Amino acid sequence: MVDVDEFIEEAKAEIAEEIGDKHAVIGLSGGVDSSTAAALAYEAIGDQLTAVYVDTGLMRKGETDEIRETFDYMDSLRIVEAQDRFLDELAGETDPEEKRHIIGEQFIREFETVAREVDADYLVQGTIYPDRIESEGTIKSHHNVGGLPERIDFEGIVEPMRDLYKDEVREVARALDLEEIISERMPFPGPGLAVRIIGEVTEEKLEVAREANHVVEEELEEYEPWQALAAVIGKATGVKGDNRVHGWVVAVRSVESRDGMTARAQELDWDTLQRMQSRITGAHENVARVVYDVTHKPPATIEYE
Ligand code: XMP
């Protein structure tokens, strides 16, 4: 990207030209990519854009409220409350790729309902360069609204940020005055906390994962990691009060990276690690221990599933 203002003007012109006087939809995930694409598209075509945010119940703490506040200025923002439907669909499923598939499918179903309702001709997506590279390979099935074009006959798909890297997207987000909480927020996977829970997604594991991720984001902000997360990875024995418990093991992971394709585990100081341990074990009666993941990518991936 040469110059951020130039990029914005060109992207807006491209969006406006492609969409003309038609109607477009975009899926807002809460992450920086889709938020930036939505803000760009809204500047280009205003209320001809419907931004759809599906609350899957797999979001980070406070995320839905932040979206509501940040995009309050868009009259056409739609928030779909789909938490129960996602949990029902995921019940009993333990296979990582199946979980992704179920979430992707349900997401498309929810999104499709709105896209048909508003009679959208175009789909805008916040796809960035590394997404294209990873989905060309067979590393993981990246989803989001990827399957939609087969189900709805859109006239076209607009991907204004297809050639950008993450750090460039952040520059654009800042230039568009997106709230810092969004422009500086760490990447978060489309399937949300579901890939930070090994095995079946249950309400209790979700509660633990949501609180633990919140603690990690807060405690590690000063380290400026590319991504930091907590995952519920299994069960182990612990003692809480006078009792032995068979409780959750939470893994904390913090990595440096440019684009997520490779990553280095971050070195953290002991006090920080201990503070996270104490807050996470204290956050839920069934958390038995906290471990820190020192594995780079490769060989590990960033997420746990
Ligand atoms: P991994 O775990 O493959 O992650 O090292 C690389 C980057 O991609 C994100 N990620 C996903 N993003 N859908 C997404 O939209 C997914 O299914 C998915 N899986 C991983 C991950 O958070 C990291 O930034």
Image (cartoon, grey):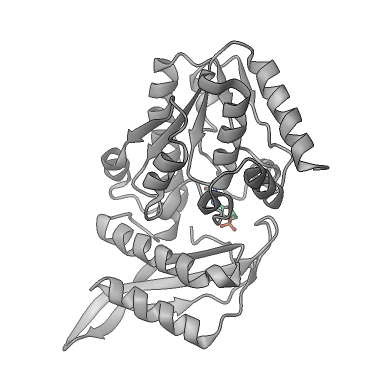
Residue 155 position, x and y percent, is 60, 14
**Left or right side of 178 for 99:** left
**Left or right side of 104 for 158:** right
Q: Residue at coordinates 42% horizontally, 81% vertically from top-left?
A: 275
Q: Residue furthest right?
A: 2
In the image, 176 versus 294, the foreground residue is 176
Residue 71 position, x and y percent, is 46, 37
Q: In which quadrant of the rendered view does residue 214 lie?
A: bottom left
Residue 23 position, x and y percent, is 53, 15
In the image, 249 versus 70, the foreground residue is 70
Count of number-bearing discs: 0
298 lies above or below 44: below
251 lies above or below 205: below
Q: Quadrant of the N terminus?
A: top right
Q: Residue at coordinates 28% horizontally, 38% vertically from top-left?
A: 85
Q: In which quadrant of the rendered view does residue 234 lie?
A: bottom left
Residue 191 visible at all: yes
Q: Residue at coordinates 65% horizontally, 49% vertically from top-left?
A: 170
215 lies above or below 130: below
Residue 24 visible at all: no
Residue 138 position, x and y percent, is 63, 46
148 lies above or below 176: above
Q: Residue furthest left?
A: 242
**Left or right side of 50 for 80:** left
Q: Residue furthest top?
A: 21
Q: In which quadrant of the rendered view does residue 107 lie?
A: top left
